[in-house]
Image: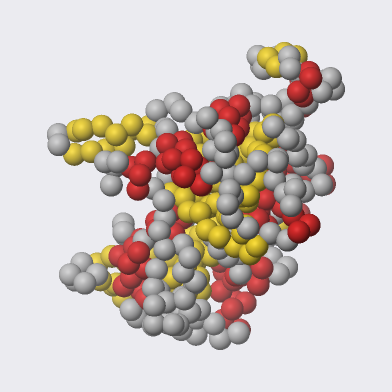
Amino acid sequence: FFEGAPITCEKKGAEESQSSSSGGHTVPVTIVTGWLGSGKTTFLRHVLETLQKSHKKIAIIQNEASGVGVEDELKLVDDEGRPVADLKEIGGGCVCCSVRSDFVAALEALLKTRKFDHIFVECSGIADPGQLAQMFWLDDSLEGGIHLNGVIGVIDARLTNLSGMDKVAKATRNQLAYADIILMNKIDLVDENTIKKLKSTLRQLNPVPVELTIRSKVKDLQTLLNLQAYKPDAAEAAIQQALGPTSHSHESHGHGHASAETHLCHHPRHSGKCAHGCNDNSEAKHGTNKLSEKECVHDESIGAHFVELKEVEIDLEKLRRWLATVLWAHIKVKENEGQKEKKMNDASVIMRMKGLLRVKGSTERHYLQAVQELFEITTGPKWSQQDEAVSSKFVIIGQRLNAKELEDGLRNCCSGAD
């Protein structure tokens, strides 16, 4: 897998609809992530109670002991008879499954037991949802049975130090970077100002919708059941969300959003030198409107960045080559006793990427989706006449993002670029 990795990281079969090869509908899988005590299990109890009343068959897969409760009533085994999960019946055809190690094997065994309307995967407090998302998005052996609905991130509203460097803040940032919607839970325990500040911080980290909840109860569960965040055209909606009323778009300029350590200013008009060492004197490019030090957000860890390219067209082959390089830039492939293994380095890490592309020689929209080292580019409806001046837009979420390098790299993917 690692040899020639930059050539093999594009997801294939992306044009297929979310239906099985036999013509039946696939089962949506939703990943629920968040730090310990954020309210994941309470949310899943709420989901279970609500859907059981509608006679829906739900499976909850856990990779940790949880309050939903799993007892060793039944062992799920793989094709070779090895136990892969413990299963508990929880009424109405629903099950709760505690996975021992292999999520794919457990899910395949689970799908053989019955038909489900929805499957939820509850990550442990320290699990990487990006790896799970990439696995469910990529695994060809499961494509006939499931599709990835999206990632729900849950955060305790009392976590006021999200920009901090303690392990809880770091892990939470990593988890929420992959979220397609964020539930800010326990808002009844904080004041309005705290909620407002945390929402602002979350937007800098990952500009997805944030829903406020008390005891993890959501107002519209159907929205979460139908995220469809990995459908190709979901990228366009995600970009519009990122360009909300508090966002700005700028030609020939990335708009960075970061939280606590990337050395990336989150506002494009920053000029001069701030207390953290940002030095940008290009006032003709950025404007003369200087920001205070408090408005400059630095995070060597995780943040979001927006890039808009106007009046240019994307060369798909150049873009594919650039993606195949940049998505693996943080990984060193090293021989270890004859085996190839991944080693991390200090380069920028793109965790999630979405794009709406104007492509050279095409009258159709093109969509980009990427998670960790995997990406796909798909086509959509034709541009209308009103869209003639449309630009290509990208939302990039990652670690240690270098705004200028990202923008330069994307500009070099344009038709006519050297």
Which of these two is toward me, 66 or 133?
133
Which of these two is toward me, 241 or 112?
241
Residue 220: percent from the left, percent from the top?
A: 71, 69
The answer to whether any part of residue 193 appears in the image is yes
Query: In this picture, is 146 found above or below 289?
Result: below
Which of these two is toward me, 269 or 179?
269
Residue occupying the point 40% across, 59% down: 12
Residue 228 horizontal side relative to residue 249, left or right = left
Query: In this picture, is 343 found above or below 45?
Result: above
Which of these two is toward me, 298 or 331?
331
The answer to whether any part of residue 160 appears in the image is no
Residue 23: percent from the left, percent from the top?
A: 44, 82
Residue 141: percent from the left, percent from the top?
A: 32, 67
Residue occupying the point 35% across, 64% down: 140
Residue occupying the point 79% across, 19% down: 284
* Quarter-of-image position of residue 366: bottom right
Residue 55: percent from the left, percent from the top?
A: 56, 86
For this orientation, the residue located farthest to the right is 289
* Quarter-of-image position of residue 80: bottom left
Residue 352 horizontal side relative to residue 4, left or right = right
Residue occupying the point 63% across, 58% down: 363
* Quarter-of-image position of residue 234: bottom right
